Amino acid sequence: MFLNIDESRPYLSGFTAFYESEIAHWMADQIARHRKAKRQALIVAGAGLAGLALLIWLNFAADIHIEELSVELAFALPILIVVGVVFLALWPLRKLHGEVKAFLLGKVCGFLDLKYSEVPAGFPFDNFNDIGLLPGHHRRKLEDNISGSHDEVAFSLCEARLERRQRDSKGRTTYVEVYHGILFQLTFPKRFAGRTLVTRDGGSIGNFFRGIGKQERVTLEDPRFEKLFEVYSSDQVEARYLLTPTFMERMMALAATFGEKSVEMAFVDDHLLVSIRVRKDQFEGGSMFQAMDDTKRIETLIEELCKIYDLIDTLQLNIKTNV
């Protein structure tokens, strides 16, 4: 079997053999389950559409008129039926997908000597929130805690979705997503006492709501860095001690890799906190519709996990000298 992964990376050496012996056979055993789940989805969807068609026929061809009950119910009932049908149709696929994701992440993280937990209990989310690294929000969802070390740099990460409550034109409460990204906590080779935030410029109003107003603006000498980031700190001298010209170059290289508007950082309690915004879910092990024996499942997962190592390598956090 050929996997399109770079085994020249030391931590991936021997992975193809590991995949064939520890993963491929289990995935092959799920093919029949996957086909059955897809057949069930089609049957439920077909029954649901038939029921919806009957409802429409009753409305227009029989003596029962849904709109006589209420305008709201006339619109809401078909929508509720569609939502219910979709939920029931996809439930077996979603259940199987969850099992496959847990299996793949457990196996791959085990190979890489990393720890994986679906629920990130104990992850220091408040450190990210308190310093203003995250936008204001009213509810959050954290998942997929992965922790370990690379080149003696310890790290812990999780995927986060944040939503802010708002009211629509009719006064109804709705939620809008204001953040989706990966949060990293990493050990940093310099000791420091203050708190420093390196963020995109959110404007005066945006910065105020993120809590940036509690810290002083720091001006640095590199105009390229200043164009990408705004720096706020409780200690101007310490901020410059941390953000050396060399480290700023590494941060700009990281921004070029992940997207200039995606990367933000903070220095808190002897740790480097990194936020990287993403557009799609990470560490999923493929979609619920993807073939079980499709090697893209594992290749994409490996690619996503390698970004952890790339981040540490780009910032060169293993260097104990004046970074």
Image: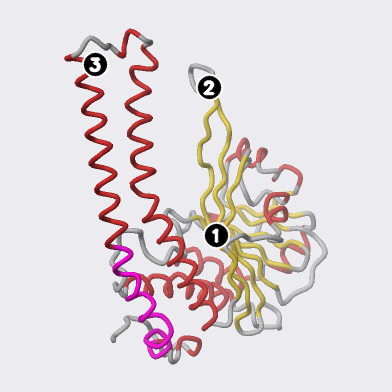
Magenta span has 10?
Answer: no
Label 2 Cα crowd, 10 Å radius (few <14 / some 14-19 / many 20+): few
Residue nearest the viewer, comparing 271 with 251: 271
* Left or right of residue 266, residue 93 in this image: left
Write down the residue under mark 1: 182
Q: What are the residue bounds of the magenta stretch?
A: 16-34
* Left or right of residue 286, residue 111 in this image: right
**Pointer 1 or 2: first along the chain:** 2
Q: CA distance from mark 1 to mark 3?
A: 48 Å
Where 147 sits versus 220, above or below?
Answer: below
Q: Please give the count of numbered marks on the rendered protein.
A: 3
Write down the residue under mark 3: 59
Write down the residue under mark 2: 172
In the picture as drawn, the residue positioned furthest to the front comes out as 63
Kind of residue sitting beneath label 3: Asn
* Residue ID at (56%, 41%): 163
Q: CA distance from mark 1 to mark 2?
A: 31 Å
Residue 87 in percent (x, y) is at 39, 43
Q: Secondary structure at mark 2?
A: loop
Q: CA distance from mark 2 to mark 3?
A: 29 Å
